[in-house]
């Protein structure tokens, strides 16, 4: 019986030894996996940091470029305004208000395409039916049947005679407009 007991103990010891070796091997593999996971996590963090830095650098570059563009646009606008002032005044140094007073009035005849409180579009037959768009302010003289009216009261199809001048920004500024013949859209209105 003693031999049997010794044999059982030997088998049990051998099983424990093999089990311990397997457990040690599993533990080492788990440690290797954990180390690999830490390495991956660290590399992922570093990659995210690099991406964030690259985005920040790009955003700073875009902001700087936008600032440069805005500054260049301001400088260009100032140079254009100065050039237009010099052209309008002949370089004499007069103010914009003086320039507007000295600018020659242009005249045009045509048919109203559209009109609102501060703009009007006129079709000009002399210029191959070109549509001319004018800006207007409160000083515009608008006459219809020899009476002053509001610009917005003019209708599409009305035949008009208008005077205008170019402002320093290159826009046509309406000075006066007079209805010559009213359109058929004005029933009962007298025609000249």
Image: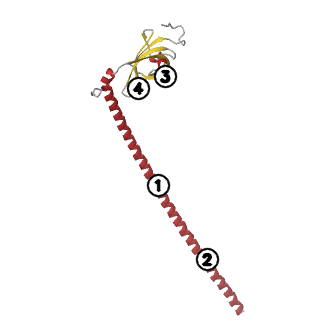
**Distance between the alpha carbons at the discs numbered 4 and 1:** 48 Å
Q: Decide: marks 3, 4 in contact (CB < 8 A)?
A: no
Where 40 falls versus 109 (above or below)? below
* Image quadrant in which you'd find residue 76: top left
Q: Say which residue appears at 52% left-offset and 12% top-offset.
A: 183
Mark 4 or mark 2: whose residue is earlier in sequence: 2
**Tags 2 and 3 touching, CB below 8 Å:** no
Question: Which of the 4 quarters of the picture holds residue 164?
Answer: top left
Left or right placement of residue 32 versus residue 138 in this view: right
User: Which residue in the rendered view is the most extreme toward the left?
Assistant: 92
Q: Do the residues under discs 4 and 1 have CB atoms within 8 angstroms?
A: no
Identify the residue under disc 4.
171
**Image location of residue 150, percent across then percent down:** 44, 16
Please give the residue where the numbered disc 3 appears in the rendered image.
130
Where, quadrant-wise, is the N terminus in this rendering?
bottom right
Between 101 and 136, the one nearer to me in the picture: 101
Q: CA distance from mark 4 to mark 2?
A: 89 Å
Query: Is 176 rendered above or below residue 23?
Result: above
Mark before the other along the chain sequence, 4 or 1 = 1
- Circle 2 residues within 10 Å: few <14, some 14–19, many ≥20: few
> Label 3 crowding class (10 Å Cα cut-off): few <14, some 14-19, many 20+?
few
Residue annotated with mark 1: 52
Please state which of the two labelled residues, at mark 2 or mark 3, is closer to the viewer. Answer: 3
Residue visible at 48% across and 22% down? 131
Q: Earlier in the sequence, mark 2 or mark 3?
A: 2
Q: Nearer the viewer, residue 151 or 28?
A: 151
* x and y percentages locating residue 178 in the rendered image: 43, 13
Q: Nearer the viewer, mark 2 or mark 1?
A: 1
Is 135 above or below relative to 181? below
Q: CA distance from mark 2 to mark 1?
A: 43 Å
Disc 2 target residue: 23
Which residue is nearer to you in this view: 65 or 38?
65
């Amino acid at each position: 019986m003693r031999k049997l007991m010794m044999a059982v103990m030997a088998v049990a010891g051998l099983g424990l030894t093999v089990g311990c070796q397997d457990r040690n091997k599993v533990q080492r593999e788990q440690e290797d996996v954990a180390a690999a996971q830490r390495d991956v996590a660290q590399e992922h963090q570093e990659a995210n940091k690099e991406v964030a830095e690259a985005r920040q650098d790009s955003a700073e570059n875009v902001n700087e470029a936008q600032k440069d563009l805005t500054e260049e646009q301001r400088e260009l606008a100032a140079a254009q305004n100065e050039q237009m002032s010099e052209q309008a005044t002949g370089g004499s140094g007069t103010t914009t208000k003086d320039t507007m007073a000295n600018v020659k009035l242009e005249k045009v005849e045509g048919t109203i395409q559209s009109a609102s409180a501060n703009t009007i579009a006129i079709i000009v037959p002399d210029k191959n039916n070109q549509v001319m768009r004018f800006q207007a302010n409160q000083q515009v003289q608008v006459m219809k049947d020899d009476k002053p009216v509001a610009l917005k009261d003019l209708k599409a199809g009305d035949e008009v005679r208008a005077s205008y001048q170019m402002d320093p920004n290159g826009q046509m500024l309406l000075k006066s407009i007079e209805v010559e013949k009213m359109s058929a859209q004005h029933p009962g209105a007298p025609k000249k």
